[in-house]
Amino acid sequence: MEKVLGLPLKKIPQWVISCGLILLLLIALVPVYRLTLYAFPYYDDFNYGINVKYAFEHGAGFSKVIKTAYEDTVFTYNTWQGTYSSVFLMVLMPAAFGYQYYFIGLCAIITMFVLGTCYLTYTVCSKVFKASKLSSFNLALFVTLMNVELFYEAQQGFYWYNSSIHYTFMHSLMFVLLAEIIRIVYSDKKAGTAFRVAVSSILAFIVAGANFVTGLQGFLMILFIFLAGVFVIKNKRAIWALCPLLIFFAGMILNVAAPGNASRQAIYADVAKGPIESVLYSFLAGFKHLNEFTGFPFWAFFVGLIPLAYMVAKSSSFNFKMPLLVTALSFCFYSTGYTPSLYGMGYDGLARTFCAVKLVFLVLVAINLIYWLGWIGKKLDKDSEDGKEGVLSFFENRVIVFVLSAALVVLSFAVSKNQAGKFLTYGAYYYVHTGEALNYYNEHMVMDTLIKEAGDEVVLDPFVWRPWFLCKKDELETYPMAEQNQALARWYGKREIYISE
């Protein structure tokens, strides 16, 4: 049988899949990047970037700006939070140099998200599973495309600098760090090891100063890779991974021991959970969010992931043992994404947290799919050893499987009640091409002019244009003492700013 429902069953060459996925990913990202041009700073963007703005407006050069950012980071470390690397980047908020530069920071976040996801997935497939480079590359491209389209919340994770630099960017940077450490541990060549150790050590110090979700998951994963390299793989060069591990640990101590953390903890003292309780509730949160992270669009993409995962497993020399244990450990690791929020605030997290957690979840789904297909293929599918096509060979880059996946994606889009929210590319395209994004940006630029020309008390009309990816529901309140209103007032040097009722 060569056809099913008129569609060819023949296999697609790997290089053709590579070209197709690269093209799809580029097309998918064009509207996502374009929408950054219409984003506008909000709330903590103003709070953290204000001193750099003042320094720049008073003629400060590069060195003075960096010094100001460093001083602000130290001040925040002592008074509010210990996440030193995140705070440093928050303080260097691009709009401090002019609103027209705000998009640059957002583009950097999206780029790191794409590169980090692709690089880590490719590294796991090619180095850990020892699969062919082309099949590893194809799966990495598809997982990245899947992560882009099914991104948890674009507003919090991409289009608000302060929020997304703290979680999306840092988690993506953690992916790059993990990939570099994997390459140290699995390398059988001396060439490049010293360079990778140096790069991973620098990245370790940066990532350790991020949010606690990234810090916890990063430390656990680096420790796991190191122990696996020393005691399981028994590669002598794996000992070099101890360097970034120790630097990461030291950075985490520096982060957690910050005097300013006490100020934040005092706010949540009555609702924060204890260490053991936080861990237990993390598993409940993990189960709770599984339904939210999956759904029809997820399963539609999952169908297209199967043949790519099968090709990785087929070309792999890895011995896929104990898949149930791997899946159980994967779920435990995924659930740690909720632990810091439960411990610090008493609930499982904010939307920006879930952006990072879902990123990990989707990568783990791909890795587990490879593992299970590898286990089934090597343990149960005996026909392939006799020169016959095994049961799983149906998924070997068959045209019909990709067509089925594409059809399911289209169907899931058609029946979705929230098309813009469920599919990032369409949402970005929609807000750009309906003009909502441009009108939103222009309205804020008019606001900028009105505030500058007004006196110390500024009363603004309520915003008309509110594209969901860009506009926060509480951008400004009707009472001057609202924190976001005060942040904007300080930014412009006004006594109070608020909107009319």
Image (cartoon, rainbow, N blue to C red):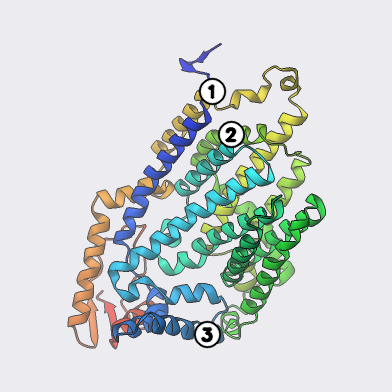
Q: Earlier in the sequence, mark 2 or mark 1?
A: 1
Q: Earlier in the sequence, mark 3 or mark 1?
A: 1
* In this rendering, the label closer to the viewer, 2 or 1: 1
Residue 192 shown left or right of residue 44 in the figure: right
Residue under the point 22% across and 66% down: 443
Residue wearing tag 2: 306
**x and y percentages locating residue 473 in the rendered image:** 36, 65
Task: Work out whether residue 351 can be spotted.
Answer: no
- Disc 1 marks a residue whose amino acid type is Lys
Res. 227 mark: none
Res. 11 mark: 1
Among all residues in the image, which is located at the extreme top? Answer: 1
- Disc 3 marks a residue whose amino acid type is Val
**x and y percentages locating residue 72 in the rendered image:** 47, 84
Q: Report the number of discs.
A: 3
Give the secondary structure at mark 2: helix
Give the secondary structure at mark 3: helix
Residue wearing tag 3: 74
